[in-house]
Amino acid sequence: MDTLPVNIPGFVWAYRFSPEEKTAVRLTNSATVADLTAENCFYWLHLNLVDARVPALLETLDGLTEEAKSALTTHDTHAALTVDEQMLYGTLVDCQRDFAQDTNNLGWLHFAMSDRFIITTRLQPLRSVERARTLIEKNPGKFSRPVDLFELLVIEFQRTLIAIVIELTEELNQIEDIVYDNAPRDERRRLAPVRRTVVRLHRHLRTVLALMRRAAAADEDEMPFGFDDVARRLTSRLETVDHDVYALQDRARLLHEEIDSKQSSETNRHLYLLSIMTAFLLPPTLVTGFFGMNTANPPFAVGDYGTEYAFILIIASIAFAWWLLRRVNIL
């Protein structure tokens, strides 16, 4: 790991690619902007937007339009994709990663690409970008154009979605086993974050798909060389995972409805039992209320058997209530 101070503001990493030599050289922290460019080479510069000097750095880079510079420094939290003047720029959705593990929290990758470079910026570390860097280290000769790097970033995002779908599917399997078990348990609290994650992924994935189709339909004179073929391949990949995410969303919704149905049935059962208890206790309440009225000369007030008579009437009233409920098919 290079521990020297960086010369490029916001520098995370940078690679210089030589298609002829099929090499990818990772630049050190001491590299300058002049080291990015070389004859017959293109570069990938990855920047951290936490550094407030990044906008000033972008002003010094050749080939960036004002719209591309704005796309690289925006704080918008929605996907965007624009083809203009043989450049491609916008914002892609990704998932964040921390020091210990990957997360399902959404993050945003801003990018600008031409035939000579691809520049990416972000606020938080991202899962797909880190895996793309690892693949470049393993197979540097595979990438001969900046559009190949863009395709790699989107493919890694698709693979991230597949990993999340597998993880959420396993979570739904566990919830489903509990929901359909005989022992009633409320799993809505556990299901809620799963549904929220799936809904957010599906919403942003549909947006990326729509933007990719729109960009693929742009004028060929406007788009970077080779992007039309890449866009078709990426659209096909994203549509496949979109079907999986949609199926997961539908399954989570049906599972939530099943939980609500079981909770409603359980509530109805409790109300039924409460109604039965009320029906049983109403006649004894009438008997005890009658014997407790503040009236003169109530029945059985004279003699030693008033309590016994009252107890017998209470038992008889309960038996009568039970017989009546059985007669009308409530019990």
Image (cartoon, rainbow, N blue to C red):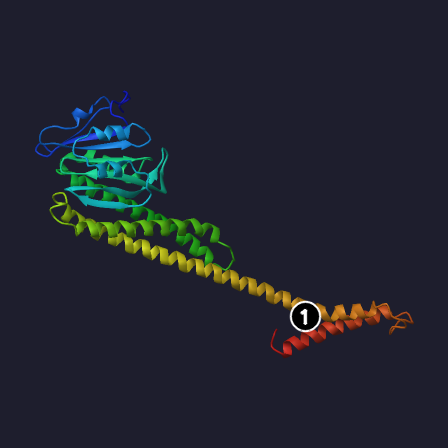
Does residue 17 appear to the left or right of 204 in the view shown? left
Establish if 234 lies above or below 273: above
Q: Specify the quadrant of the image occupied by residue 58.
A: top left
- Classify residue 55 by image quadrant: top left
Which residue, as the protein is rendered here, is positioned at the far front?
66
Which image quadrant: the N terminus?
top left
Residue in the image at 83% along x and 72% along y:
309
Front-most of residues 297 and 63 = 63
Residue 88 coordinates in the image, percent (x, y): 19, 42
Q: Is residue 10 visible?
A: no
* Residue in the foreground of this view, choosing between 153 and 320: 153
The residue lying furthest to the bottom in this view is: 327
Against 75, residue 313 (above or below) is below
Label count reads: 1
Crowd around label 1: few <14 · some 14–19 · many ≥20 (10 Å): some
In-front residue for pair 183/72: 72
For the residue labelled by badge 1, is the local secondary structure a helix, a strand or a loop? helix
- Indicate the amino acid at tag 1: Ala
Quadrant of the image containing the C terminus: bottom right
Q: Can residue 153 be seen in this snapshot?
A: yes
Q: Quadrant of residue 269?
A: bottom right
**In-image side of 326 versus 133 (left or right):** right
Relative image position of residue 11 (x, y in whole percent): 26, 28
Question: Residue 22: x, y in percent?
Answer: 11, 33
Q: Is residue 123 left or right of residue 265?
A: left
Q: Residue at point 26% right, 47% down?
A: 158
The residue singled out by tag 1 in the image is 279
Q: Position of residue 108 (x, y in %)?
A: 31, 40
For the point 36% across and 37% down, which residue is it?
Answer: 101
- Pick out the residue farthest to the right: 302
In screen coordinates, is 187 left or right of 91? right
Depth check: 112 or 233 in front?
112
